[in-house]
Structures are given as C-alpha cells and as structure tokens.
Amino acid sequence: MATDKEQIALMFNDIAPTYDKLNHILSLNVDKSWRRKAVKRLKKSLATVQDPMILDVACGTADSTIQIAKIIKNAEVLGLDISEKMLEIGEEKVIKLGLNDRIKLFNSCAENIDFLDNKFDAVFVAFGVRNFSDRMKGLSEILRVLKPQCSLFVLELSEPHNVIVRWFYNLYFKNILPFIGKKVSGNGAAYRYLQQTVEKFPMPKEFVMMLQDIGYQDVKHKAFSLGLCRLYQAKKN
Ligand SMILES: C[S@@+](CC[C@H](N)C(=O)[O-])C[C@H]1O[C@@H](n2cnc3c(N)ncnc32)[C@H](O)[C@@H]1O
C-alpha cells in the first residue's frame, strides 16, 4: 500500500501537465505576484551575501525556483520535489529559459533532505508546506540545512479573516475551484484535496508557534491580498 507521501507524489504526477495553466487560471494570475513579492523579500534578506545558495523545497514545476533565479541574479538555486512529473516540466522550463547553469532540480523530499547541515543561505517553500506528509519533520530538516542567521520563507494560501471576503472565498474554494480543477485536469479529487489542505493548515498564530517550537527565531508573517495568502519568515539562530 502506498504511503501518504507516495500518494501525494502520484497525485501531483497526475495533475502535472495542467498544473501551471490551472494555477494561473484559478488564481487569476495573482499567484505570480505573490511569488514575486515573496522573492523580493527573500532578496532583501540576502543583500549582504555575495553568491547565495538557495534551496526551493517543494519546487513543483519550478515557477518559484525560476522566479528566485530571475530576481536574485547572483544566486545558485536548488529545487527539490517528490513528484517526478512536476520536476520534468520544471526542467523543460529551466532549459528553455537558459537558467540550467544556475538552477538544479532534484527528486527528493522535505522530510529527508539530502544535504549537509548549515548549507543554505535561505530556504523558500511556496505552497508546499501544507502538503508535507510530516510537517514537523520537514520544517526541522529545513532548519538543519539552513546556515545560522539565515531564514526560511514560507508562502501559503490562507483563509481570510474578513467575514465577507471569507464568504466569497468559501464559495470559490469549495465549489468553483474543484469544478474547474476537474474540468481542466480531469482529477477533481486532487483539487478537492488541495482545498482541504488549505482548510486544515494551521492559523497564522499556530503556525508561528509551530515554527518557534521547532527552533526558529524572529518569526513574522505578512498577509497578501486581504489574507488570501501569507508569507512567513523565520530565522535560524
Ligand atoms: C502546490 S505545489 C507548489 C509548487 C511550487 N512551489 C509553486 O510555487 O508552484 C506543491 C508541491 O509540493 C510537492 N510536495 C508535496 N509534499 C512534498 C514533500 N514532502 N517534499 C517535497 N515536495 C513535496 C508536490 O509534489 C508539489 O509539486
């Protein structure tokens, strides 16, 4: 029987061919601006680092990895993901953009990162943490591979606080999103799962506490688009 992680990888393999297209349709392209804003903050944190080495965990089809390499021009970026098919599409995009000298993609998982301790100047995870089969383990592994005084950046969808915005959000996420997801990808269950993972993701206060319990310091977060998305930043001591 497949483990949770294997099932998640199979699900992403299945939706990989339509993942990029659907992402942009479903978010009305706002996902691109969220990644851009997050990477600009990441760049700011690396202002004094000469040639930063950045790890993009759960890099998927490398949209986040490519964004990092484009905005932080002196960086070497390594992306890892459990889904081979998502990585294949990412690899094609990286080659097409001529970024293969600065971006390397690996089939690996957050819960068991194949790198030595204190290796990276920053770690980035966009829309990935909510899919980790063992969130504590994945975030602890990231802490291990971060250099001291360096930061983890987590970009995640979140439920907005405002009651009216939340009403529209629920209508969209629970009804429209799985419907369009099924029509385009043919996998309605995957898009219902994605909606459920957002629902089950800890509230900002709880997620901050989780990061602190694991050992991160100076944890802060910022809401984008009325709280539909949130960027967390957390430092290794
Ligand atoms: C919603 S996609 C996000 C992809 C990309 N970061 C982006 O910005 O579009 C989530 C990705 O997380 C990957 N993933 C899920 N669990 C993982 C784990 N434990 N370790 C590494 N990658 C994982 C999935 O295979 C999928 O490609």
Image (cartoon, grey):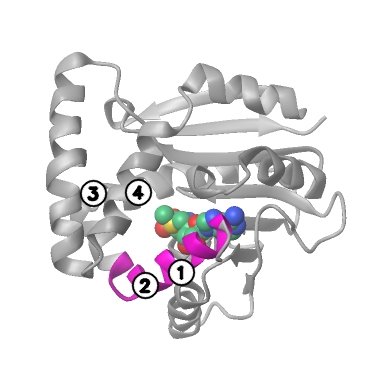
Label placed on residue 108: none
Q: Secondary structure at mark 3?
A: loop
Q: Would residue 72 be found to the left or right of residue 230 on screen?
A: right
Chief SS of the magenta region: helix
On the image, numbered disc 3 is attached to which residue? 27
Q: Residue at (42%, 49%) from the top-left corner?
A: 35
On the image, numbered disc 1 is attached to which residue? 10
Q: Quadrant of residue 105?
A: bottom right
Cα separation, mark 2 vs mark 3, equals: 20 Å
Q: Amino acid at mark 4?
A: Leu
Q: Are marks 2 and 1 in contact (CB under 8 Å)?
A: yes
* Number of the front mark, 2 or 3: 2
Query: Mark 3 or mark 2, which is nearer the start of the sequence?
Result: 2
On the image, numbered disc 4 is attached to which residue? 194
Query: Mark 1 or mark 3, which is nearer the start of the sequence?
Result: 1
Q: What segment carries the magenta color?
A: 4-19
Mark 2 surroundings: few (<14), some (14-19) or many (≥20) residues within 10 A: some
Q: Residue at (19%, 32%) from the top-left corner?
A: 169
Cα separation, mark 4 vs mark 1, equals: 14 Å
Mark 1, ligand 1, within 8 Å: the answer is no
Q: Position of residue 130 (x, y in %)?
A: 49, 43
Furthest toward the right, the residue is 117
**Vertical relation: 87 (above or below) 153:** below
Mark 4, ligand 1, within 8 Å: the answer is yes
Q: Would residue 182 be found to the left or right of residue 1 on screen?
A: left
Q: Quadrant of residue 149?
A: top right
* Number of the front mark, 3 or 1: 1
